[in-house]
Amino acid sequence: EALAAAIASNDFAERKALYEKVGLIGARDVPMWYSGHTATVIALHEDLTGLATWTTVDGSLGIGHPAAEGRWHMVWWTK
């Protein structure tokens, strides 16, 4: 009801109060799960090389794959 009323209103203060009401209802009634980030994984076949050994532009070894974003330009099949 509050969302419908907020959408229909042209009064800023009224809309602000209605959206605050919605936010408070959500904070009270909606389950929250704070995970820090989404779990991700990259799985590969033994014939796929380069994914676990990618390097940066200065030649340093890469530090894994944040958010499962592989450095696919350095990957190749060995068979």
Image (spheres, helix red, strand yellow):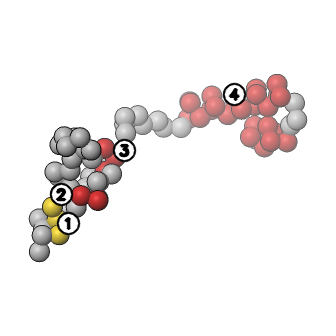
Tell me which numbered mark, 4 or 1, is placed earlier along the sequence: 4
**Residue 39, visible in the rendered structure:** no
Q: How many residues crowd mark 3 within 10 Å: few (<14), some (14–19), many (20+)?
A: few
Q: Disc 3 designates what residue?
A: 38
Tell me which numbered mark, 3 or 4, is placed earlier along the sequence: 4
Q: Disc 1 designates what residue?
A: 76
In the rendered structure, find residue 50 and report the number of the disc placed on it: 2
Q: Residue 14: image x %, image y %?
A: 82, 28
Element type where label 3 sits in the image:
loop
Disc number lying in front (3 or 2): 2
Measured in 3D between alpha carbons, the distance from the residue under mark 1 to the one under mark 3, in whole angstroms, is 27 Å
Disc number lying in front (1 or 3): 1
What amino acid type should be assigned to the residue bearing mark 4? Glu
In this rendering, position of residue 6 left or right of residue 35: right
What amino acid type should be assigned to the residue bearing mark 2? Gly
Tell me which numbered mark, 3 or 2, is placed earlier along the sequence: 3
Measured in 3D between alpha carbons, the distance from the residue under mark 2 to the one under mark 1, in whole angstroms, is 7 Å
What amino acid type should be assigned to the residue bearing mark 1? Trp
What amino acid type should be assigned to the residue bearing mark 3? Thr
Measured in 3D between alpha carbons, the distance from the residue under mark 3 to the one under mark 2, in whole angstroms, is 24 Å
Q: Residue 68: image x %, image y %?
A: 31, 51
Element type where label 2 sits in the image:
loop
In the rendered structure, find residue 15 and report the number of the disc placed on it: none
Measured in 3D between alpha carbons, the distance from the residue under mark 2 to the one under mark 4, in whole angstroms, is 51 Å
Mark 2 and mark 1 in contact? Answer it, CB < 8 Å.
yes
Q: How many marks?
A: 4
In the rendered structure, find residue 20 and report the number of the disc placed on it: 4
